[in-house]
C-alpha cells in the first residue's frame, strides 16, 4: 500500500480508487521550492514521504526549513545519483518513453542516448569541475544532515550492470563503513560513491586523494541556497 509516484494524475487515481494508499513522492517530480511542495501536499493529503530534487541536496537552508514546516512528512535524500548539477534535460529524461515509433528511433535525436550524450558532454568537458560540483552526499557528510533531522537516505544503482551481478552491494557496504569512520574508506576509489562514474575503471583517485579538493559541507550550510541564483 505504499507507492513511489511522480505523475500527479496517477497520484490522483490511486487516491480516488485506493484511498488507503500511501504516496511517496518521487524525486522525478523535480519540485524545487517550499511553495511547490506545500501546494503538492495540500492537493494530496496522503503523501507520507518525498525525495527532493537532486539539485536540492546541498541547499541546507531549504532542507532545514521544509523539515520544520512539514515534520510529519518523511524526507529522504538520494546520496550517490551522480547527475550533473542543474541538468536542464533531467525532467525530460525522467519522462522519456522508450517504446516510440521505429522511424523516429532511427533518428539519433529521438533515441534515449540523446540525454546521456548531452549531459556527458558537460561532464567530459571539465571532469574536475564535475567531480567537485556534483550533488553527491558523501559518507563523511551524513552527520551534518542528521543534525537537522534528516535520517533517511537512498542509495541508487539498480540500473547498473554491477547491481545485476551483485557487486554494487559492496559499494553500499563501503558507503556505510565510511559513515562509521572515514578511515575505513580513505584508500577506496572515489568512483564507488558516485553512480554516474562507478564503472570508470581507469579512475584511480582515492577518497584520500580527492577529499581535500571537494567543497566543504560547512560552505553549503551558509551558502547552499545561493547556488540557484548566484553561482
Image (cartoon, helix red, strand yellow):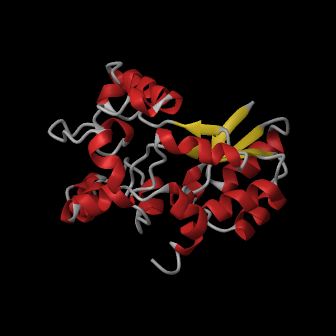
* The C terminus sits in image quarter: bottom left
Return the residue found at the far bottom: 230
Taking 180 as reference, is 76 left or right?
right
Marker count (numbered):
0
Residue at the spot x=48%, y=38% of the render? 139
Would residue 170 be seen by someone viewing this image from the given angle? yes
Taking 107 as reference, is 12 left or right?
right
Residue at the spot x=40%, y=30% of the render? 183
Q: Nearer the viewer, residue 225 or 1?
A: 225
Would residue 123 be seen by someone viewing this image from the given angle? no
* The N terminus sits in image quarter: top right
Q: Nearer the viewer, residue 179 or 97?
A: 179
Residue at the spot x=63%, y=47% of the render? 145
Q: Position of residue 41 (x, y in %)?
A: 79, 57
Q: Position of residue 230 (x, y in %)?
A: 49, 81
Q: Position of residue 115 (x, y in %)?
A: 32, 58
Looking at the image, residue 157 lies above or below residue 197: above
Residue at the spot x=62%, y=53% of the render? 7
Return the residue found at the far top: 166
Q: Position of residue 74 (x, y in %)?
A: 74, 43
Q: Nearer the viewer, residue 155 or 6?
A: 155
Quadrant of the rendered image containing residue 32:
bottom right
Q: Nearer the viewer, residue 92 or 69?
A: 69
Amino acid at each position: 500500500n505504499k507507492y513511489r509516484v511522480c505523475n500527479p494524475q496517477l497520484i490522483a487515481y490511486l487516491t480516488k480508487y485506493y484511498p488507503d494508499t500511501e504516496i511517496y513522492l518521487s524525486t522525478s517530480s523535480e519540485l524545487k521550492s517550499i511553495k511547490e511542495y506545500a501546494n503538492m501536499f495540500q492537493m494530496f493529503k496522503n503523501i507520507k514521504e518525498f525525495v527532493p530534487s537532486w539539485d536540492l541536496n546541498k541547499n541546507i537552508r531549504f532542507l532545514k526549513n521544509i523539515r520544520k514546516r512539514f515534520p510529519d512528512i518523511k524526507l529522504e535524500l538520494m546520496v550517490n545519483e551522480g547527475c550533473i548539477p542543474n541538468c536542464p534535460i533531467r525532467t525530460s529524461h525522467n519522462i522519456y518513453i522508450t517504446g516510440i515509433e521505429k522511424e523516429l528511433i532511427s533518428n539519433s535525436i529521438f533515441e534515449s542516448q540523446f540525454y546521456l550524450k548531452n549531459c556527458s558532454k558537460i561532464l567530459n568537458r571539465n571532469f574536475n569541475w564535475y567531480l567537485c560540483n556534483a550533488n553527491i552526499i558523501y559518507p563523511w557528510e551524513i552527520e551534518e544532515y542528521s543534525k537537522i533531522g534528516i535520517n533517511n537516505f537512498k542509495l541508487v544503482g539498480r540500473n547498473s550492470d554491477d547491481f545485476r551481478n551483485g557487486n554494487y552491494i559492496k559499494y553500499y557496504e563501503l558507503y556505510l563503513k565510511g559513515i562509521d569512520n572515514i578511515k575505513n574508506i580513505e584508500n577506496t576509489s572515489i568512483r564507488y560513491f558516485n553512480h554516474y562514474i562507478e564503472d570508470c575503471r581507469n579512475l584511480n583517485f582515492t577518497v584520500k586523494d580527492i577529499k581535500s579538493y571537494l567543497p566543504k559541507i560547512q560552505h553549503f550550510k551558509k551558502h547552499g541556497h545561493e547556488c540557484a541564483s548566484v553561482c
